[in-house]
Each structure stands twice: as structure tokens, then as C-alpha cells.
């Protein structure tokens, strides 16, 4: 008596071929007509600084520490990271000032200090 199910390379090839023919069969829906569900939406999170985050020493220290992680990168990479970090720092300072966690004058002072921070491996201005 022979088994009904065959195993081995030949049966694997036949099984794969039948799947492929089923996928491109003229009786099935065309590939372009098949739809996939949209990716799930990720929730937008707005950063909410607290009193400690808005302290100038904390902002400056975090700025320096973040860039130090990338000290071995080429100068153009460091420049781009610095630009991104300045944009984030500016947004954080504005939010801190808008929420009266620091004064506008203090935010301006910290902003000027952030801008004058040297890149890792370079000499301070």
C-alpha cells in the first residue's frame, strides 16, 4: 500500500508550483486588485517638559551628552545631528517658556548657550 501523502523534493516542488499557479491564476483576483489594510496609526505624542527638564543646566548637559555619543562620526554627520538637536532644544525652550517654567529671558540665555556649544572633538569658540 502506498501512502497518500508523498514527502521529498518532488512533492515540495509540485506543492510550490500549485501555490504559484493559484496566485497568478486568471480565475483569482488580479494582484493589483488585492488590497492590504492600512498600517496602524501611531499616536502623536507631544513632549510635556517638567520643572527639572526646563532647568538650564539639565538642558545644556543633555545637549552635550547626546552629541558625545556620536563623537566618532564624520563632521558633516555631527553638524546635521547638532542642527536637529538645536531644533529640538528650541522647541523645548519655547514650550518651557510658554508654560512659565522658565522666563523668556532665561530661555533666550540658554538658547544662546546651546548655539555656542562646540561639536565633540572640536575646540570651544
Image (cartoon, rainbow, N blue to C red):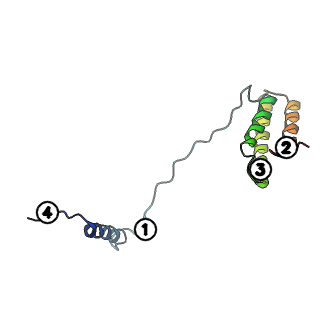
Location of residue 30 by image quarter: bottom left
Dot 4 lies on which element?
Answer: loop
Location of residue 119 by image quarter: top right
Q: In this view, does 102 lie to the left or right of 14?
A: right
User: Residue 15's x, y, as percent?
Assistant: 28, 67
For label 1, the residue is 31
Dot 2 lies on which element?
Answer: loop
Q: In this view, does 111 lie above or below 30?
A: above
Q: Nearer the viewer, mark 2 or mark 1?
A: 2
Per the model, the C-alpha gap separating discs 2 and 4 is: 76 Å
Q: In this view, does 24 lie above or below 87?
A: below
10 Å crowding of disc 4: few (<14), some (14-19), many (20+): few
For label 4, the residue is 3
Q: Residue at x 14, y 63 (%)?
A: 3
Task: Mark 1 and mark 3 in contact? Answer it, CB < 8 Å.
Answer: no
Location of residue 55 by image quarter: top right
For label 2, the residue is 118
Q: Is residue 84 above or below residue 34?
A: above
Q: Which residue is drawn at 25% across and 65% down?
A: 8
Per the model, the C-alpha gap separating discs 2 and 1 is: 54 Å
Q: Which of marks 1 and 3 is in front?
A: 3
Dot 3 lies on which element?
Answer: helix
10 Å crowding of disc 3: few (<14), some (14-19), many (20+): some
User: Residue 24's x, y, as percent?
Assistant: 37, 71
Of labels 2 and 1, earlier in sequence is 1
Q: Which residue is drawn at 77% across and 51% down?
A: 80
User: Residue 20's x, y, as percent?
Assistant: 35, 69
Of labels 3 and 4, earlier in sequence is 4
Of labels 1 and 4, earlier in sequence is 4
For label 3, the residue is 78
The quarter of the rendered structure image containing the N terminus is: bottom left
Which residue is nearer to you in this view: 84 or 39?
84
Amino acid at each position: 500500500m502506498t501512502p497518500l501523502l508523498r514527502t521529498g523534493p518532488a512533492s515540495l516542488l509540485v506543492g510550490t508550483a500549485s501555490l504559484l499557479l493559484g496566485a497568478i491564476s486568471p480565475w483569482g483576483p488580479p494582484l493589483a486588485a488585492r488590497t492590504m489594510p492600512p498600517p496602524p496609526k501611531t499616536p502623536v505624542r507631544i513632549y510635556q517638559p517638567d520643572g527639572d527638564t526646563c532647568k538650564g543646566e539639565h538642558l545644556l548637559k543633555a545637549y552635550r551628552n547626546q552629541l558625545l555619543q556620536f563623537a566618532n562620526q564624520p563632521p558633516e554627520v555631527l553638524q546635521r545631528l547638532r542642527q536637529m538637536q538645536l531644533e529640538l532644544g528650541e522647541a523645548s525652550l519655547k514650550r518651557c517658556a510658554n508654560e512659565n517654567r522658565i522666563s523668556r529671558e532665561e530661555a533666550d540665555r540658554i538658547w544662546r548657550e546651546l548655539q555656542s556649544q562646540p561639536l565633540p572633538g572640536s575646540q570651544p569658540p
